[in-house]
């Protein structure tokens, strides 16, 4: 081989090496969809804590292209959007919006009471997802992998009348989203109506055609329900069980390298450590702001919470729910429900 040919071959090998190195170091862009506009507690936590940590842990190799406010997908279509992986690689999936696809995840909202603070709530969900693989398997059947979970605010009763007694709601009309909470209100004697979640709610409260809401504290604040329903009963233990799954398309996840997956998982650990305290600070701040606006926010006593738990007849509603599930799902749910209940009971101590 001539010297010229040898040099040409060496140059070709060197060029190939440079190309392979460039490909190996190429930035990975993951497109993210979220149905809520950017700026609230959850969306800021996702962007400022989790996404920032992913970029840091991956040394800038992984970047999240975030789209907020339903730009790419609505809340009810998010599971399908991420499942298909064409429009977005990652997105927030709310189990409550897809009960047919995620039946097992519905059981979280079936408990009327929960832990006394957000840190214990975070530990509860971490324990459940780590120790009970059926939830991961349910997501896998939908071509999803959960990267991280986020939590909402506790529930609250927004009432137009003072001195609300939760176990005697006869003659009152309520709006709530969850089918579990609808049943609890009816078991307490209330009437539940369905209405779109918009300014009509506040108008109905002012007009007296609606007497109250059972909703997470921040959703009530979003529509300024406290301006019409000024009497708010609240407790950190008033369980909502509303979990936001930050899920990724399964094929996209499996195509990541071992190092890339590890970087995302380390970012998740950082997020979990910050999530509970951030939630509690945000809840306390919102309660104080509502009081400054003139709302009468009363904390439910332990006796009132126990009374609501008894009035809800939640275990009866859980049995009804199990009877509605398809055979395979019902078997898993029947086995899982007491395991979830025992872990929640420990978290509440």
Image (spheres, helix red, strand yellow):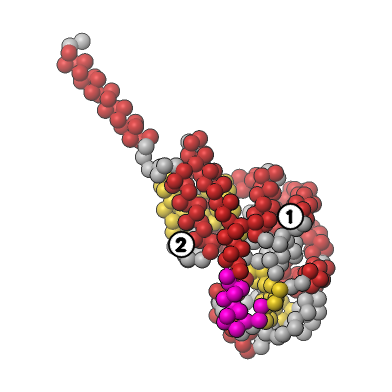
**First in sequence: mark 2 vs mark 1:** 2
Where is residue 100, by image quadrant? bottom right
Residue 270 coordinates in the image, percent (x, y): 54, 48
The crowd level at tag 2 (other Cα within 10 Å; few <14, some 14-19, many 20+) is some
In the depicted structure, whether residue 261 falls above or below residue 244: above
**Residue 298 seen by the camera:** yes
Residue 134 coordinates in the image, percent (x, y): 69, 45
Which residue is labeled 1 in the image? 347
**Residue 94 seen by the camera:** no
Residue at 72% of width from left, 85% of height from top?
Answer: 162
282 and 16: which is toward the camera:
282
Which residue is labeled 2 in the image? 68
Residue 292 coordinates in the image, percent (x, y): 57, 80
- What quarter of the picture does the C terminus occupy? bottom right
In the depicted structure, whether residue 116 falls above or below residue 82: below
319 and 308: which is toward the camera:
308
Residue at 62% of width from left, 77% of height from top?
Answer: 195
């Amino acid at each position: 081989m001539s010297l010229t040919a040898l040099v040409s071959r060496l140059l070709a090998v060197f060029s190939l090496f440079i190309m392979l190195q460039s490909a190996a170091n190429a930035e990975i862009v993951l497109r993210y969809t979220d149905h809520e506009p950017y700026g609230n507690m959850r969306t800021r936590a996702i962007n400022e804590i989790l996404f920032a940590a992913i970029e840091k842990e991956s040394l800038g190799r992984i970047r999240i292209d975030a789209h907020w406010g339903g730009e790419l997908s609505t809340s009810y279509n998010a599971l399908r959007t991420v499942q298909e992986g064409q429009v977005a690689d990652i997105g927030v999936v709310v189990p409550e919006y897809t009960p047919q696809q995620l039946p097992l995840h519905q059981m979280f909202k079936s408990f009327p009471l929960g832990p006394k603070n957000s840190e214990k709530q975070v530990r509860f969900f971490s324990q459940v997802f780590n120790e009970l693989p059926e939830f991961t398997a349910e997501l896998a059947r939908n071509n999803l992998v959960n990267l991280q979970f986020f939590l909402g605010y506790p529930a609250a009763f927004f009432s137009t009348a003072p001195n609300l007694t939760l176990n005697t709601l006869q003659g009152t009309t309520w709006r709530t989203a969850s089918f579990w909470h609808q049943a609890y209100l009816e078991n307490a004697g209330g009437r539940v109506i369905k209405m779109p979640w918009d300014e009509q709610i506040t108008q109905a409260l002012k007009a007296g055609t609606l007497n109250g809401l059972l909703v997470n504290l921040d959703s009530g604040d979003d529509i300024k329900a406290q301006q019409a329903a000024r009497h708010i009963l609240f407790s950190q233990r008033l369980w909502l069980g509303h979990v936001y799954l930050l899920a990724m398309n399964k094929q996209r996840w499996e195509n990541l390298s071992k190092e890339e997956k590890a970087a995302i998982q380390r970012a998740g650990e950082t997020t979990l450590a910050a999530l509970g305290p951030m939630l509690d600070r945000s809840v306390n701040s919102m309660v104080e702001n509502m009081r400054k606006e003139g709302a009468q926010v009363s904390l439910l006593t332990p006796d009132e919470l126990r009374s609501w738990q008894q009035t809800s007849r939640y275990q009866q509603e859980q049995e009804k729910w199990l009877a509605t599930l398809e055979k395979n799902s019902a078997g898993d749910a029947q086995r899982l429900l007491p395991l979830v209940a025992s872990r929640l009971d420990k978290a509440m101590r």
